[in-house]
Amino acid sequence: EDQVTQSPEALRLQEGESSSLNCSYTVSGLRGLFWYRQDPGKGPEFLFTLYSAGEEKEKERLKATLTKKESFLHITAPKPEDSATYLCAVPHSGGGADGLTFGKGTHLIIQP
Amino acid sequence: NAGVTQTPKFRVLKTGQSMTLLCAQDMNHEYMYWYRQDPGMGLRLIHYSVGEGTTAKGEVPDGYNVSRLKKQNFLLGLESAAPSQTSVYFCASRGNTYEQYFGPGTRLTVT
C-alpha cells in the first residue's frame, strides 16, 4: 500500500530563518513525486515534480530534492507570504488505479 | 485560461437531500478527479475519469456518483446526503504527465 508521511505537522519560523520540510514515501515504482502549496480556503497549487533520486528543482525561495526514500522541501530566507500548508503526493502504484496519494501536509507559519 | 473551475463554492444541505457539484476544465485534459479533504485525513480520491464517457472508483466512493458526458466537465453527485459527507471537495485534472491541477474547492455542510 502506498504511504506518504510528512513531517513536521506544523512549523513556525521567523522571517529569514531557513528550514526544511520532509516527505517520506513508500511506493512501488515511483512515477514522480509532487509538491503542492495550499493556502487557507484554496485548492492545492502545483509547485514541483521530481522523477528520480538526485533530482532538484528550484522556484524562488523553495528547493525540492529527492532521494530513494524521501523528499525535502528547503525554504531559504522565508518571507511571511510563504506561510501555507505544503503537501507532497505520489501517483497510486496499484494496478489500474489512478489518482494521487497525499501526505497530510506541513502547516508552515513565517512570522515577521 | 481559467484552468479548473468548480461550482458552487459553498453549499449547505439537510440529511437526505441531493445535489450535484460541477467541475469544468479548459486545458483539454483527458483525466479528471474528485477528492475530498477532511481535517487530519488529507486529500482522498473519490472517483476519477480517464476520458469522456468513463468513470472509475477511487479510495472512498460510497455515497457518491459521477458522470463525464463531456471531456471538459466532471460531475459529482450525492443522492442522499449524510453528515459524514460534510467536507471540502476538490476537482483536479491532468494531461499526459502525472501532476494534477486543482480547482478552488466546494465547501459542503450536511446538517
Image (cartoon, coloured by chain):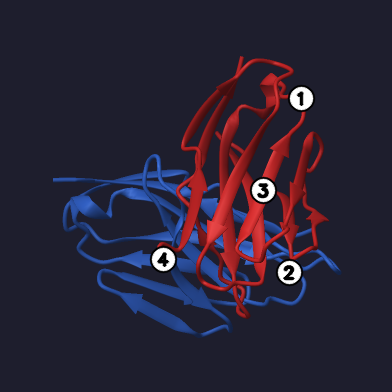
Chain colours: A blue, B red
How far apart, in angstroms, are the residues tagged by discs 2 and 4?
33 Å
- Camera-nearest label, 1 or 4: 1
Please determine if labels 2 and 4 lie on a single subunit: no
Which residue is painted at 54% across and 53% down in the image? A6
Looking at the image, is B26 positioned above or below residue B79?
below
Residue B75 marker? 3
Q: Quadrant of the C terminus of chain B?
A: top right
Residue A2 location (% of width, % of height): 74, 60
Q: Residues within 10 Å of mark 3 (few under 14, many from 20)?
A: some
Looking at the image, is B108 positioned above or below residue A32?
above
Residue at the disc numbered 2: B51
Residue at the disc numbered 4: A73
Horizontal side of residue A62 vs A52, given as left or right: left
How far apart, in angstroms, are the residues tagged by discs 1 and 4?
41 Å
Horizontal side of residue A94 vs A39, given as left or right: right
Q: Earlier in the sequence, mark 2 or mark 1?
A: 2
Q: Residues within 10 Å of mark 1 (few under 14, many from 20)?
A: some
Please determine if labels 1 and 3 lie on a single subunit: yes
Residue at the disc numbered 1: B80
